[in-house]
Image (cartoon, rainbow, N blue to C red):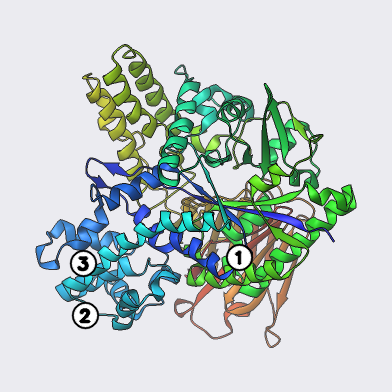
Amino acid sequence: MKPLRICFLWHQHQPYYRSEEIFILPWVRFHSVKDYLDLALLLDEFPNIKQTFNIVPSLLLQIEEYLSNQVKDKIQVLSFKHPSELTKEEKNEILKQFFVCNYQNLIAPYPRYLQLYEKVKNGFELNEEELLDLQVWYNLAWVGPITRQRSYFQRFFQKGKNFTQTEKELLLNLHLKTLEEIVPTLKRLKVLQQIDLSISPFYHPILPLLIDNGIAKLGLPDIELGEEEFRYPGDALLHIQKGKSFFYSHFGFTPLGIWPSEGALSTEALQIILSEGFLWTATDPKLLFKTINIEKPEIQYFPFLYEENGKKLFVFFRDRGLSDAIGFTYHHWNTEKAVDDFINRLFYIRQQIINSFGEEHLEIACVPIILDGENCWEFYPENGLPFLKSLYSRLQELDEFKTTFFTDVVSQMPSDYSYVLKEIFPGSWIDANFYTWIGQKPKQKAWFWLSRTRKLVEKYKSNETKFNNAMELMLIAEGSDWFWWYGDDNIAPNKEDFDVLYRYYLRKIYECLEEEVPKELFQPLQIDFADFPFVPATQRISESNLKNLNTEFGWGRFKPSASIGTMHSEKELVNEIYFGNTSNLFLLGIVLSKELKLNDSIKVIFTNPSGLVFKINCEDFSLESTFSNRDLRKIFFSFKRNYVIGIDIEFLIGENIKFEESSIEFLIELETELGTIVYPSSGTLTYYLI
């Protein structure tokens, strides 16, 4: 029996947060102590599991700067201060920032942290003792479940409250001790041949857009980019060369694989990657299907060979369903159910390959599981540890599957390999286009200033010192994250900070060249940053507005895309969810980005009251209920472009119960051919009847 090979890749990335001598955001430190080390340490329990860790050099650089004490982050600085030394502004900043984490998994499990959260939420001030405990808990809650088992962390969890300044300072220094372990741990696992290491371009730019941002028009033909073009293939090459060199200085070898930032590729990007000696890269299968005009799912499990001038580069295609299930779906599920689903999908893929091509094709096939190595775990109980342990155990036990490295798959390819690419359709892992980075006016405005600044830098090529200094700053400004956060498609509590940092680096370039800084770079490039995901209902919905989904008519609204933050799924289909009530109906409206296909379905799952599921497909709806003692007297349903349902309130909450004392909790589960996604991504939506 031939096994199906599984290639895991954990992409570990943070943008460059440094402004002068401070990191304005703490995510390098927090994800280091919660995710980057733990994800590697877990493999010691599963010696037969092999994985690839993709390290973005800008993350590695920031870890280095933490450990050299060159730079601290804002949260770190606020945490070190004794409460008696804090100004009023600093105290307010702590109350604002020190609960920015997943409530369900990082706040609620800890009684003291939850107590402080509730007190601040209800408008009460914290005394010095409580502020000190809050400083400790915000930093303590981020410690990963494996790392926290060490006795020096356990004493903090066991004590729980009434911490001293000395204890707090020790905790913050232990964070740095944890950061120190990351590179040595990766080196050790590499020596043991349990992990492989790959890289991304240095500051995580979108390579095809650096080479020629006009290429965005191929996937977005209606986009208007303006007159300022950006066309600097040399910059794309420089990001890769600097990344390779920096990686070598830390690990002592040159990586053979590269995950292009956001899986973004074009034929020109492939040429540059090939020229730098890489053996493999990866992207989304939609790029393959658009290139070869065949959408046969099984073909994505064969890497395609791109060859030029005698050099070979294999392109792998991430399994969207399995990768996104880990990233966006399974944290809602019971652990064993999630693992069963993952394994069953692998069995299905294996059988489909055998049915379509024959069992011998398993020798050249593999299933790439590629996703962020940090962002999803915050949504899992215990940071995903029970899920990963169960998954790894099952994979080790089953002879039908074998985890391996992309590099090993490439090294075993036959010389007469027939899956070949001559070119590739340009796009990213998100919708096979570049919309997320250049598709909206604020993003295009950011590209305008990038282009104008880069043209200025080019004029100083004859001045080596000025040019080199400006180019280092330019590479930072070319990172993908600044453009990700402009526009209204991604929302985070600290979204404005990315605009601040982006403009800071553009200004620094002008200053470095001793040029006058344009006044526009002292003002935000986008004003309307606040597109809040949740808008509460304001009044009962009138009979005439049952189909008019708009907040001006009293409807409440949840906007999933505005709550995604750094997480994004190919399966996104629900644009908005509306909710409200009449005098006798609870109303729910769902606005889709496109029509449901024949086998697509939407489930409205009520958790309070529990026992009710409303299922919608493109032609019909059904209601599953355990309320055997209640009569459903009234129901409303509208099948237009938007779906609106209304359910008898007394059926939901029971008779003779006052509206003002009742709430309804629910979540929405979308099932498509690409898999399952749940809204909201964490917890439930709660609606208070009006």
Q: Which residue is mark 3?
A: 169
Instruction: Please state the horizontal and vertical placement of residue 505, each as a whole percent of the image.
Output: 30, 33
Q: Nearer the viewer, mark 3 or mark 2?
A: 3
Whether tag 3 and tag 2 are in contact, CB under 8 A, the answer is no
Instruction: Please state the horizontal and vertical placement of residue 156, each as a whole percent of the image.
Output: 30, 77
- The quarter of the picture where the N terminus appears is bottom right
Instruction: Please state the horizontal and vertical placement of residue 12, each as a whole percent of the image.
Output: 48, 50
In the rendered structure, the answer to whether residue 203 lies left or right of residue 131 reads right
**Mark 2 is on which residue type?**
Asn
1 or 2: tag closer to the N-terminus: 2
Query: Is any part of residue 485 visible from this angle?
Result: no
Whether tag 3 and tag 1 are in contact, CB under 8 A, the answer is no
Q: Which residue is mark 1?
A: 330
**Mark 1 is on which residue type?**
Tyr
In the rendered structure, the answer to whether residue 112 lies left or right of residue 296 reads left
Q: Nearer the viewer, residue 158 or 608?
A: 158
Q: Marks 3 and 1, how far apart in space?
A: 36 Å
3 or 1: tag closer to the N-terminus: 3
Q: Marks 1 and 2, how far apart in space?
A: 37 Å
Residue 162 is tagged as: 2
The answer to whether 200 is drawn above or below residue 343 in the figure is above
Q: Residue furthest left?
A: 85
Q: Marks 3 and 2, how far apart in space?
A: 14 Å
Q: Nearer the viewer, residue 663 or 37?
A: 37
**Mark 3 is on which residue type?**
Glu
Residue 38 is tagged as: none
Instruction: Please state the horizontal and vertical placement of residue 473, each as a whole percent of the image.
Output: 32, 30
